[in-house]
Amino acid sequence: MEPKHSGWGIASFIISVAAGILIFATIVIAGVMETQTPGGLDENETVTGLIGLAIIGLMLADLLAFIFGIVGLVQRDTKKVFAILGIIFSGITLLGTLGLMVLGISME
């Protein structure tokens, strides 16, 4: 009997792809708002806080996808494709987002 795909791996893949797309969209929206607001975004505005919370929440979801991928990878008698893809996608998204944060902090 051929092994089935890991449910944890499938969950990891779906969450990592969704979180990656939503993080990218949130960063693009923040960038557009920054360029279209005279003087840039004010750190004390509610919208700015909500954008930050959205990015942090999505990064936590991506971290969860990474953990799910590891769980799917260590399961016996299951296919590992989705678990590996989930780990790769979530890892790239997390590192890329953290890199952009470090870059933004260093430019101040």
Image (tube, helix red, strand yellow):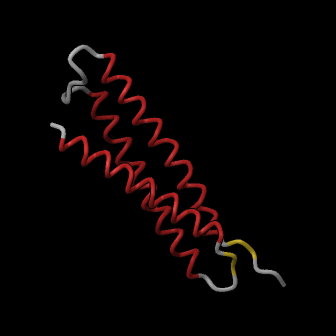
Q: Is residue 35 above or below residue 103?
A: above
Instruction: Please name the residue shown 46% across and 40% down the image.
Output: 24
Residue 44: image location, x then y, percent: 18, 28
Residue 69: image location, x then y, percent: 54, 69
Residue reaching furthest to the left = 108
Instruction: Please name the residue shown 84% across and 85% down the image.
Output: 1
Instruction: Please name the residue shown 19% across and 43% down the image.
Output: 105
Residue reaching furthest to the right = 1
Q: Is residue 105 left or right of residue 15?
A: left
Residue 89: image location, x then y, percent: 52, 58
Report how many numbered discs are placed on residues in the image.
0
Pick the residue in front: 96 or 54: 96
Quadrant in the picture for residue 14: bottom right
Pick the residue in front: 58 or 99: 99
Q: Is residue 18 above or below residue 50?
A: below
Residue 66: image location, x then y, percent: 47, 65
Q: Is residue 5 above or below residue 18?
A: below
| Quadrant holding the C terminus | top left
Q: Is residue 80 left or right of residue 100?
A: right
